[in-house]
Amino acid sequence: MSLPSLALSRSRPLRYAVFFYLYVMVWLPGGFSGTALYNYLTAGGATTADTGDFVALAGLPWAFQFVWGPVIDRFQRSAMGRRRPWVLGAQLLALAAFLGLLFVSDPRAEVGLLGLLFFVHGVCAAVQDTAVDALAISVVPDDERGRVTGFMRAGGLFGGLAVGAAGGAVLLEYVGFRPAVLTLAGVLLALTLLTLFVKERPGDALFPWSRPAEDRQAAPPPELSVPAIFARSFGGLVAPRSLVVFGGAAVAYLAANVSYRSYSNHLLRSAGWGHDDLSVLTGLLGAVVPMAVVLAGGALVDRVGHRRMLVSVMVLIGVFLTGFNLLAAEWGREGVGTGALVAWSVFDPLVSVTAMPLLMAICRRGVEGSQFTAYMALVNLTDVAGQFVTGRALEVVSPPAVGLCCGAAVLVMAAVVAAVRPPEAPAPLPPADEGWYARAAGAVTSPSR
């Protein structure tokens, strides 16, 4: 394939392939830290407080991902394309930060340093994720976004769970920590090199020193005011329906994640599971079963309705967590552990495929990218807070007690979301003239939502 044909705006198969592997890159390190290393440290005798702090510190930068959306939207004038320079730059920084893990000689004895290094990597990866989402919004046609989103989610599941979690666990067990880091870094490097030869549009410059075609694209959009973008995004976030809908999704995410961490702790410390067995099973289940859920769930959501489907999924999760933890005496039966992990593997993608369209629907016109990034950052913040709390909670209460609290919380929020009227379609904004951006700050108190 010649280089000019590697333009995302011109090729549908290329878009599917590129956004698949871009999300492999974004999720791979997180699967390695959040599953493979977490289980490796837990099985090696690290305290629940240490492992909880490690996962929380590694995930903390994602809680502030909302900062990068307005910055990336503000600076998008480049000969290499509107979004591609951000994607490439963030990939290179994330790769360098991942290689910094080689400074750790014994991860089980240096949990604090390990967490700090993953914190640095997380900052770079959060920029990368935001830039990839912005790239998708810029080059994917409206009638193709659902399918591309499916490929993005599938790539994330494959990279995070099959490669980062399952592959990382096997590497940790059989070759050790540093060889595992080098192997995964090699995968990230290879995919970064691919991005060097993918353009947004045919006329874009391939490298910073290359000259773009004179007719490469229409004039880029005006550079918006960062304070105005923040102001209007914040107004959308604090609107009552936004708080209820996002609150339901966040509680569902949090409960599924916290209850899984509690149960995996039981499997490793009480049921005699090996860390590599748990990581490999989690990774394989998370790469195969949820991918099928993502591909089939989108069509069902469109038929049933976003809000109704979200409530149904929340009720499903709440009933499962309540019943499963009430029957904790049966956890020792053969096949129960595997069956439970199958259920947990579909919870996160189920919430995503039902909640994401609903959250997109309540984003304010003109700042959809920044507001949606803020939602994702807040989801990550709830996850980080949950990891921190779980590590402390397991020191004083049992995993079944933690799971019961999670189930009750989801059922309560499902009732709240069901009682709220569905969000109305946002009214169109006036044309983007120079004065509109200055007036955007006034939208914070606007009753339009």
Image (tube, rainbow, N blue to C red):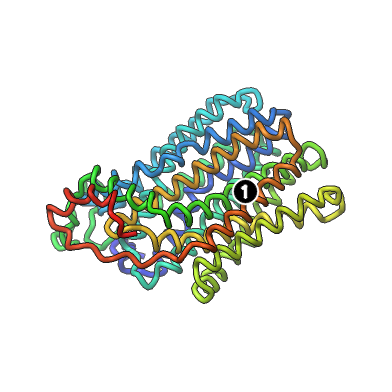
4 lies left or right of 345: left
Of residue 212 and residue 312, the one placed in the foreground of this image is 312
Of residue 278 and residue 308, the one placed in the foreground of this image is 308
225, above or below 117, in the image: below
Of residue 376 and residue 284, the one placed in the foreground of this image is 376
Residue 156: give x, y in percent of width and height.
52, 54
Residue 50: give x, y in percent of width and height.
64, 28
Residue lying farthest bottom? 303
Residue 434: give x, y in percent of width and height.
12, 53
Question: At 66% from the left edge and 31% from the top edge, which residue is drawn?
Answer: 392
Classify the position of the N terminus by image quarter.
Answer: bottom left
222 lies left or right of 242: left
How many marks overall? 1
Residue 71: give x, y in percent of width and height.
29, 43
* Residue 200: quadrant of the picture: bottom left
65, above or below 411, in the image: above
Question: At 39% from the left edge and 60% from the top edge, which residue is drawn?
Answer: 362
Element type where label 1 sits in the image: helix
Query: Are there few (<14), some (14-19), or many (20+) residues within 10 Å of tag 1?
Result: many
Q: From where the camera sits, is residue 287 visible?
A: yes
36 lies left or right of 434: right
* Residue 144: quadrant of the picture: bottom left
Amino acid type of the residue that numbered disc 1 sits on in the rendered structure: Ala
Q: From where the camera sits, is residue 206 visible?
A: no
Question: At 29% from the left edge and 45% from the top edge, which residue is drawn?
Answer: 230
Of residue 267 and residue 89, the one placed in the foreground of this image is 267
Classify the position of the C terminus by image quarter.
Answer: bottom left
- Residue that mark 1 sits on: 255
